[in-house]
Amino acid sequence: MKRTLAVLAVIAFASLCIPVAVHGQNTITGTVLDSLTQERLQYATVYINGTTKGTVTDADGHFELKDVSYPATVVFSFVGYKSQAHDIVRNPGHLSIELKPNIDLPEVVITGKKVKRKDLSYFKSMFLGDDRWGRHATIRNENVIMIENTHYTRKVAVNDIGYEVDEKVSVFNAWASEPLIIDLPLLGYVLYVDLVYFTVEHIGGNTLCDMLGYFYYKPYTIGKESKLVSFEKNRRQAYYNSSQHFLRSVYENRLEENGYILAMADNSTIIRLDIIKYNPIGIEKYSDIIEDSIMQIHGLKDKRLKILYYHKYDDTPLNLKKNKTTLYPFSESGITFMKDTCVFYKDGIVIDNNIRFMGEMSEKRVGACLPDDYNID
């Protein structure tokens, strides 16, 4: 189901995966324990958030995580225990991680209401997406999902003299008692998500989505060359015209080469066959690399920007420095910067929740998500 910019479907998925920057390679070792009994936990999962890098503890609760690039968020997860995420900026030495048993879970199960089928369908639609990526994705353990709906009316001032009207607000909250296991058959991944919360707010005519979760991707182990080729083709299609692709293009100062044009939404008229009426802006005027692998955007707070993505008929980006746009299709998205200065990593991952996307890019949900360490060869 497509949403127009008027609906303002704002998705903050990318901003919730703490990034991994490309610095020196290192190995992290440690032990995972039960915080109450000090028993060593076997087969606990240890992974770098948002990536394909992970491992499990051995019979002694020991783990070794290789090829870590700092800074990184390392997540420790085990069924029946509360997950932990640790931001690590340098080699920490041998770690001793104590996971707390999820003792609140039985109470939640007893007092919580059974998830309604329509609520579960709505969650999958908003979480996985309504596009081909989301429709093909499946959640293996739907039974661990918990959902709560809240509806209320609030007073809103609509003019300077304080005239108030009633505004309806609906809040949809979802969380999971243990990691979600999600099959992404088109992309060739099994995705594990430690979902802390997923919230959808309907306020007036706007739909606002937010999420906190930790992602671990495990590639399918399929030896057939044809399958591997198919996976890579689909990954590229999901990657192009995504927030990840766009922000990487901004960092590399390659927007035009990668098919993008950026313009102020308030003062630009875009007509495909009359490009003269189109007034793009140069993002380089508003961006600086502030330290290794981190870029800062400034001076665009609350500005409504349009993103046009032009592509060839095989869905690959159109190099706008070499080709005219009038003969090629395009799609439209939007981007808003919520603060005076917003930062993101060179891999296209937002550090905080202050860069938000609308339109086409926001339609790509978890079903179309790729690892932070995904690169096109």
Image: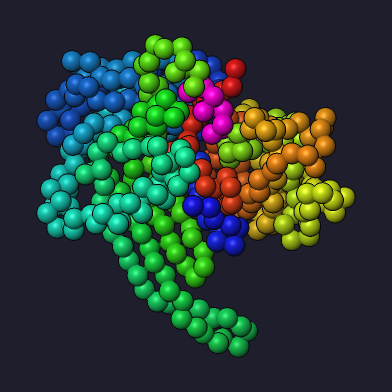
Q: Is residue 24 or residue 331 the one in the foreground?
A: 331
Q: Is residue 332 above or below residue 347?
A: below
Q: Is residue 97 above or below residue 243?
A: above
Which residue is drawn at the image coordinates 74% and 61% (left, top)?
266
Highlighted magenta segment, given as a residue range:
231-239
Which residue is drawn at the image coordinates 32% and 66% (left, top)?
150
Q: Where residue 344 sits: x, y (%)?
A: 59, 38
**Is 284 left or right of 334, judged from the image as shown?**
right
- Secondary structure character of the magenta stretch overall: helix
State whether residue 303 appears in this view.
yes
The number of numbered badges drawn on the structure is 0
Q: Is residue 218 above or below residue 299?
A: above
Q: Is residue 91 or residue 19 the one in the foreground?
A: 19
Which residue is drawn at the image coordinates 55% and 87% (left, top)?
163
Q: Where residue 76 sits: x, y (%)?
A: 31, 30
Q: Where residue 290 sits: x, y (%)?
A: 67, 35
Which residue is drawn at the image coordinates 52% and 47% (left, top)?
363
Residue 140 drawn in magenta: no
Q: Quadrant of the C terminus?
A: top right
**Is 113 left or right of 358, judged from the image as shown?**
left
